[in-house]
Each structure stands twice: as C-alpha cells, then as structure tokens.
Image (spheres, grey):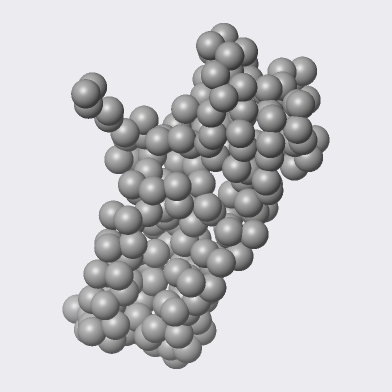
Amino acid sequence: MKKREPSLKIGARLTLFLVSYMPLFLIMTFSQFYKYKEYLHWGGVNLESIWIFSKYFGAATLLILLSIYGAVGLKFLLSNFERRATVNGDLITIDDIENKNSESISYLFTYLIPFVFQDLSSLINVFSVTVLLVVTFLIYSNSSMLLINPTISMKYSLYMIEYSDLDSEKKKKGMVISRNKFLEEDDQVKIKKIGHKLFFAVDVGGDNAS
C-alpha cells in the first residue's frame, strides 16, 4: 500500500490550531492583564520588575505572540488554498451536502471553555494548560478537526459533502471549507485537497464570496 503523507506541513497545521484557540487566548490574556493590572506600574526596568512581569504576564504575552503568528499565517494559508483550488483544483458536482458550522460551537464549549478561568500567574496552571494544549494539538492535527475552527467559521462555511468527480465519475465523500455560505446540491465547485478527505472549495463561476 502506498504511504500517504499529510497534505499540510506541521507549520500549517499549527497555524490552524492556534487560530482555532484565538478567542480563548484573547479572553485569557485580557483577564490576566486586567486582574493584575496593578503590577504594570513599576519604577523602571530592573531584575525585580522583569521577574514580576514574567510571573504575571509572561504566559499571557506568549499567547499574544502565538495569536499574531496564527493570524498572519492564516491569511497566507487561506490565500494559498484558494489560489491552488482555483488554478488546479478538481472539478466536482455536489450530490449531497450538510452544513457543519454547528461543529464549531461544540468545539468552543468542549475544548475552549475549560481553559477560560485559568490563572496564568500560577506555574501549575501554566503547565497544565500547556500539556492539555499539546495533547489537543496532536489529536487535532491528525483529524477532521483541522477544519472545525470557530475563528475561520466567522467568514467561511464548513460542509460535509458527497460528490461526483467529473473526471473519474466516481462518487466520494469529504469535508470542505468554502467562502460560499450557500452551497447546495448540484452546484459545481473546484476542490483542492488539504488533508485526509479534507478540501478547500471554490465556485466554478468565481463568485466564491456569496
């Protein structure tokens, strides 16, 4: 059997993961800075002030940097997905379709909410959150959860489809993400594989922002 490699590199999968947690990171960061705002006023830079900042805001600052990395990476990643799908995507006809945007709501409550009230000035809490995030990423990056993303769902829609490949005339199933929020049966789209049975879809007519 031919060995199948992941379609997305580790950097792309990490970007999607970080973006999926961006709402959580923003909440945790705001909460941390607001809760310990009195420690933001020090008298100059010295070892003590650096230690205080690291203790109360070090983890929150790291979350800000990770969010920036994810946001910038996502912009380039989605642009690349759309370009590749438009230029050399496979032409298909949708036979059956189910909107899966509700999966993002489940993702929010199942994977994000448990972290919200963590105090990032506690080393034990930071360690616990880190371990949970690493484990979640390892599961996330090797599953269909790659496309279940609350942040991306604000602009894109997620569908489970059964489709006919116009070249091979075979019927297949897969999950697609598209800027078109109103895809229906019998629509023709071009898809580009981004994971195992995961695709990015663009309308044949080019009006993918409906």
- Between residues 120 and 34, which one lies in front from this camera angle? 120
Residue 18: x %, y % from top left: 42, 55
- Between residues 30 and 183, which one lies in front from this camera angle? 183
Classify 16 as above or below 47: above
In the image, what residue occupies the spot 45% across and 85% down? 117
Quarter of the image where one finds residue 187: top right
Query: In the figure, is residue 198 to the left or right of 184?
Result: left
In the image, what residue occupies the spot 45% across and 41% down? 73
In the image, what residue occupies the spot 63% across and 51% down? 100
Residue 102: x %, y % from top left: 64, 59
Query: In the figure, is residue 103 to the left or right of 25?
Result: right
Residue 75: x %, y % from top left: 54, 38
Query: In the figure, is residue 210 to the left or right of 115?
Result: right
Quadrant containing the C terminus is top right
Seen as rendered, the residue at the extreme front is 170
Classify 84 as above or below 103: above
Question: Is residue 184 visible from the viewing direction of this image?
Answer: yes
Quarter of the image where one finds residue 206: top right
In the image, what residue occupies the spot 23% across and 22% down? 2
Quadrant containing the N terminus is top left
Classify 37 as above or below 20: below
Residue 97: x %, y % from top left: 68, 40
- Between residues 92 and 49, which one lies in front from this camera angle? 92
